[in-house]
Amino acid sequence: MVGGIVGGMGDGERWLVAEDERGGATVVPVGEDGRPAGHVRREPDVVAAVRNHPEVTRWVWRSTADVYPRLLAAAASVQRCYDIEAAENLLLGHEGRHGEPRSAAAAHARLHRRPVPPDPPPRAAEPGSQDSLFEPSPAAHLPLEALLEVYADQLRRHDATAHPGRMRLLTAAESAGMLVAAEMNHAGLPWRADVHKDVLRELLGERYGGSGEPRRLAELADEISAAFGHRVRPDLPAEVIKAFARAGIRIKSTRKWELEEIDHPAVKPLLQYKTLYRIWTAHGWSWLQDWVRDGRFRPEYTPGGTVSGRWTTNGGGALQIPKVIRRAVVADPGWRLVVADADQMEPRVLAAISRDRGLMDVAGSEEDLYTRLSDRAFAGDREHAKLALLGAVYGQTSGDGLKNLAALRRRFPLAVAYVDDAAKAGEEGRLVRTWLGRTSPPAVGAGDDDGEAGIPQDQPLPERTSPEGEFTPGYASSDARARGRFTRNFVVQGSAADWALLLLAALRRATAGMRAELVFFQHDEVIVHCPEEEAAAVVAAVREAGELAGRIAFGETPVRFPFTVAVVECYADAK
DNA sequence: TAAATTGGCGCC
DNA sequence: AAAGGGCGCCAATTTA
């Protein structure tokens, strides 16, 4: 049953579908080894193929992003899929071949040792235009026989990994993520343009003529200039630094935390200007014009868009919606937004993957993890406990977090060793993997010894061990240390992304029989738009999906995966 | 002149 | 108290 949310063995019929250049489709049932298990049939198109074969629970196809939007537009959907190009990407990474073309055509060419076609360049975001989503891509369609070969080969390559079961799960989860992403793109996030405009007017004031510069920004710029006694353009860091220098204050940058330290009348309006300027340029009137249509904001989600497996969006900045702008996210009349935030996801994931007994015990409760941590190791000081843990995960190099790291290491040795080992691997130029097997890319300049005078490869460095047994990266170059921080974080952030994919898959299945729709996802937070009367069921489904995802990803574990859930009409009213 | 990089800051 | 990891976006600046 556990495999059911993303597809396990023997859980329904599995068919492969291939499209040709003219939109026609051929389908064939396939067995668990990827071989044909029946006759090849022709269908007018992929929509007909799916409609005519409701007995199929899992479709194997070249690219979900290419096929599924057209199915959704025709009001068709599928239970599960196997995305060959997503699988190719994950397998190439696992094999240490990041960067090789990942199209199905490339995979087929490699299989036959023929010249490998490069991937088409990534399509740029096209604000407002949804049309491109529904056109079959011009990418090379592979005939059914070729797709079958690639598929069978991929199944063998899963078996050749260190943990085949996990790798198969990763591919299944990524494929499920592709379905969810396409469905979210299709549904869109409810967005009230009128409310958005009200917020903008409130914060920024009216716009002036041609450039449309808001009144409030002009006023603040004047205040800043007055405070300096001469004209200063606040959006030019160089000019601001020079102005402070003339006033006898030396700053290295105009970063917020640095400005906050300064006692000067320009600081307050400057900080205000920065906040408002950003809202104007990133989520202002032109953003609204570009990205909101018919009451919905439709970012293009890209699952696995980051190397760690987190999603990105292609345009619209959906993963950086400023808090004040969330006022515009409002449920339809009679509907609600179920906003669910996973509590302390990354430390819980660290507990599950490191199997550190102490940290598993801390994470084996729905209570606030940092409070429990501080009760055990930090004399009740929650803030110190949190900083120490985040410092360990991010690779903090100085400050209080580092001091507290020693305490963390004593009480939770396996957890700290897990991220230290990942850091060491990175410094030595080795690859690391998430729990399910997503693999870090190689360091820039490592690997391909093309003799170019580029970045020299970092030398493997002797490990230095302190009396407490702590790993100190004392001899590593600054590049190697940066690399270590990256791999240190990668294993936790990426394994958390593994879990989040399974969460989405479980939640998608749980809501399949409802009118509820998943409409937003941001690393550890999901929003479901549903009729008011379904809200309670959705809340329960989220909580169950979190625990189920934990068990599927990490096996039997005492670690709990609780959520903070709010049922609201407006996103801004959550938490 | 266009592409790439930088600085800054929004989110996690 | 100090400034760690991952992104995307914008405008300005530098590079090709």
Image (cartoon, coloured by chain):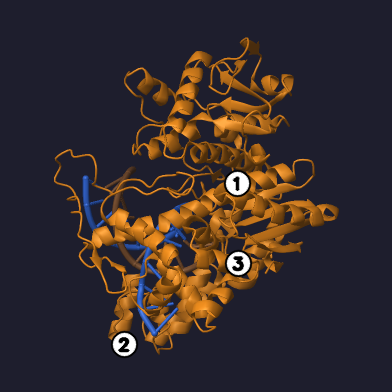
Chain colours: A orange, B brown, C blue
Q: CA distance from mark 2 to mark 3?
A: 34 Å
**Residue at image coords 24%, 42%:** A447
Marks 3 and 1 on same chain: yes
Relative vertical location of residue A374 with respect to residue A573 in this rendering, above or below: below
**Residue at image coords 48%, 62%:** A356
Q: Quadrant of residue A37?
A: top right
**Disc nearest the viewer among 2 and 1:** 1
Residue denoted by label 2: A247
Q: Earlier in the sequence, mark 3 or mark 1?
A: 3
The amino acid beneath tag 2 is Ala
In this view of the protein, which residue sits in the foreground, A560 or A29? Answer: A560
The amino acid beneath tag 1 is Ile
The chain identifier of the residue carrying mark 2 reads: A
Q: Residues within 10 Å of mark 2 (few under 14, many from 20)?
A: few
Under tag 2, what secondary structure? loop
Residue A39 image point, x, y percent = 63, 9
Is residue A310 toward the left or the right of residue A161 in the image?
right
Q: Quadrant of residue A42?
A: top right
Q: Quadrant of the C terminus of chain A?
A: bottom right
In this view of the protein, which residue sits in the foreground, A570 or A363? Answer: A363
Q: Earlier in the sequence, mark 2 or mark 1?
A: 2
The amino acid beneath tag 3 is Lys
Relative vertical location of residue A86 with respect to residue A320 in this rendering, above or below: above
Q: Residues within 10 Å of mark 1 (few under 14, many from 20)?
A: some
Q: Are marks 2 and 3 in contact (CB under 8 Å)?
A: no
Residue denoted by label 1: A552
**Which label number is shown at residue A323?**
3
Q: Residues within 10 Å of mark 3 (few under 14, many from 20)?
A: few
Q: Is residue A208 visible?
A: no
Q: CA distance from mark 3 to mark 1?
A: 33 Å
